[in-house]
Image (cartoon, grey):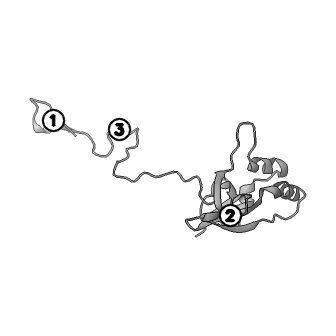
Amino acid sequence: MAAFFIGLGPSHLQFSSLTDDNRRVTSTSFYQKPQAADPFRPGALVIVTLTNPREKYWGAILHLSGEGLSLRGIEVASFDDLSAQIKNGEAFTSGVIFFPMHRLERMELDLPEGNLLSLSQRFAEKTGQDPAPLLVSEYLEEAGPQGAGEERK
């Protein structure tokens, strides 16, 4: 945009920047495709409810596509057994499972609800270990608090 002052010559024209008129606020063009947040990315800890037969699994997403879900985790019914096993110093054992999309009824992030701890928080409380690195370390790069969502190349 140009500001034109009447009575002043062309050398006194002031032009605002076409890219950033306010340097404190990052400009985003409406031509740019908006980036959607992806909460169900590789490394995210989830609880999955399946149909035929009805089952519930807790674990980390390794891959999610139109074909299905690859998950490293356990049945929710085995959660306390796994926690006790890890607490006693035994090796971590968890299967890598693929569920075809037609079996997925529901998938939710493993988050606390009110005063109820998430399964991840309960696992950490019982074992003293963060479950994310245990679940994704062999399958995703930099398995840890900062890199659990990056896929192996």
Question: Looking at the image, is mark 2 or mark 1 nearer the viewer?
Answer: 2
Image coordinates of residue 52 in percent, x first then y, are 70, 63
Which residue: 22% across, 40% down?
1
Q: Amino acid at mark 3?
A: Asn
Q: Is residue 47 visible?
A: yes
**Disc 3: which residue:** 22
Q: Quick one: label 1 or label 3, which is nearer the N terminus?
A: 1
| Res. 12 mark | 1
| Mark 2–mark 1 distance (CA, rounded to whole Å) | 65 Å
Q: Viewed as shown, does residue 30 lie left or right of 64?
A: left
Q: Is residue 43 visible?
A: no
In which quadrant of the rendered view does residue 135 lie?
Answer: bottom right
Which residue: 75% across, 40% down?
116
| Res. 71 mark | 2
Q: Amino acid at mark 2?
A: Leu
In which quadrant of the rendered view does residue 73 lie?
Answer: bottom right
Question: Looking at the image, is mark 1 or mark 3 nearer the viewer?
Answer: 3
Q: Quick one: label 2 or label 1, which is nearer the N terminus?
A: 1
Which residue: 69% across, 59% down?
50
Image coordinates of residue 2 in percent, x first then y, are 19, 39
